[in-house]
Image: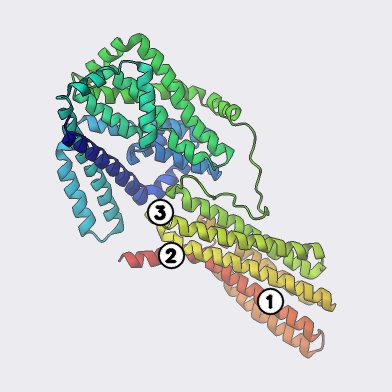
Amino acid sequence: MGFEVVLAMAGGLGLFLYGMHIMSDSIESVAGAKLRRILEIFTTNRFSGILVGFLFTGLIQSSSACTVMVVSFVNSGLMNLYQAAGVIFGSNVGTTVTALLVSFKLEKVAPIILLVGVVAFMFSKNQNVKKIGEVIIGFGVLFMGLSSMSAAMSGMKESQYILDLFASLQSPLFAIILGFVITGIVQSSSVTVSIMVLLANQGLLGMDICMYITLGCNIGSCTTALIASLSGKKDAKRAAMIHFLFNVIGTAIMYVILWFSMDWVLSAFIGIAGNNPGRIVAYAHMFFKLFLVIVLTPFIGAIVKLTYLIIPGDDKKIGYRESFQLKYIGNKVVLNPATAVVEVIKEIDRMASLASENLNRAMNALITLDQEDIDEVYQVEENINFLNHAITDHLVKINQTTLPIEDLKSIGGLFHVVNDIERIGDHAENVADNAVRRKEGNITISKIALKELGEMLDMVNTIIQYSVEMFAHGKTNHMQDILALETKIDEKERELQQNHVERLTRNECTPAAGMLFSDVVSGLERISDHATNIAFSIIEAEVDEDEDLH
């Protein structure tokens, strides 16, 4: 076999892998946010989960990407293991689409597909159209790579050494191990099975051995999700284990079936696909997966329970007030851009709850002068500062990845939200400082002043609640309430400041008490400003992004 053939094979494989990467990343970028919402909404039962997993993976051409996303969802508490199992089962069927397309020899029209993608990418100013162009480019590059590999494989038939080498692959067990190793390296069963389709078409490998190799590919495809789950919670590890168990159990079942009835299986697929070896391998791959989903779906509960035996125990629970720990994001081995923003929003929501709780604790300390409350305010403020830096660093990190376009629009707003929450925490600390001054200076605040502070705090608590709901959950039903409350709080601040001046004039309070009261009222008004910023930051970011696109 000549050096040119080796180069053509290597170049073709490189193009195929790069085309798969471009296509998968571009689809996630243009539709990742929508696909994520579909996963969240339509996975309430195992059957809808299987369908969504199939469609999702069939579209992005990667069961690994789908499973890594599911692992991230489970890690963030957005999906339970039973929902995850359905999606994972469906993704195993969806991943067979690539090999099926390869079997139809679309490489003949690859140059036209590539040209269409390049035109869309180069001559459109719309970001969505450009990303769709990238998807088409990836599809074209993928099949150009296949064309190169196919041509190289036809040259391999001239080498007796290569023919003898392939002919020596007669051990089914070795074929399964080979498929597992190759797929574990390239991180894509679609790539390995597609190569099997080409080898079968060229007559270099027998269809029976190709089928055994595809079984090994199924297990090898689990490596990405297993790696992604390493730094996750135990349920995330269990989700990856579901994927692994499905393929290991499925491989064992199919191995037994093929061992005893290979001739019958081959005859059946020859009847379906005709005398087309590559298509027979692709059809067999898809049928095996469908068959296993049908067989194993009734046992989803048992498989989930088995993961608890393999990965026992529970994670240490991280509460809202847990210090210096991230609950939803962390240093993952594999960062999934499609779920990164969701995880950040949940972490910011947790930070907002800490800041809101700390504000009320500080206001209570101002009234009761409880030293434990004052100390805890300062401790929680340190935790809020930690979250501020940790979340901001993570936002910088994910902003350097290929995020879905919709998520990319919100990144700027998320930076602002983190800063606004941190400022609310600072104002809570300022209230605690006033509590310390009041305690040390033995400053008395009148009952009417305390009542006024309570009324204003109730309004501020309400606007924070509405704003965080609007930010974290997209609930816009309180949008007008937020605007109205902001106006009322501004008016309340002016009213209380005027009342304070009148009390000073009538000598009903001391200058020290008056300064303290004025400082707290001003701080509460600024907190309502930050809350309003939180509510509208994402909307403003999207408007700014739309203006940039036009």
Q: Which residue does the numbered mark 2 point to in the structure image? A: 541
Q: How packed is label 1: few (under 14 Cα within 10 Å), some, or many (20 or more)? A: many
Quarter of the image where one finds residue 89: top left
* Lateral position of residue 216 relative to residue 5, left or right: right
Mark 2 or mark 1: which is in front? 2
Instruction: Count numbered badges in the picture.
Output: 3
**Vertical arrangement, residue 111 with respect to residue 491, above or below:** above
What amino acid type should be assigned to the residue bearing mark 3?
Thr
The CA distance from mark 2 to mark 1 is 30 Å
Name the residue: 43% across, 17% down: 253
Q: Which residue does the numbered mark 3 point to in the structure image? A: 401
Q: Earlier in the sequence, mark 3 or mark 2?
A: 3
Q: Is residue 476 visible?
A: no
- Dot 2: what SS? helix
* Lateral position of residue 345 relative to residue 430, left or right: left
What amino acid type should be assigned to the residue bearing mark 1?
Val
Q: How packed is label 3: few (under 14 Cα within 10 Å), some, or many (20 or more)? A: few
* Lateral position of residue 415 relative to residue 202, left or right: right
- Dot 1: what SS? helix
Q: Is residue 518 visible?
A: yes
* Lateral position of residue 406 relative to residue 447, left or right: left
Front residue of 72/210: it is 210
What amino acid type should be assigned to the residue bearing mark 2?
Ala
The CA distance from mark 1 to mark 3 is 43 Å
Front residue of 224/168: it is 168
| Marker disc for residue 521 | 1
**Residue 142's x, y, as percent?**
24, 40
Q: Earlier in the sequence, mark 2 or mark 1?
A: 1
**Residue 149's x, y, as percent?**
21, 34
Front residue of 40/10: it is 10
Task: Verify CB contact (< 8 Å) between mark 2 and mark 1.
Answer: no
Quarter of the image where one finds residue 16: top left
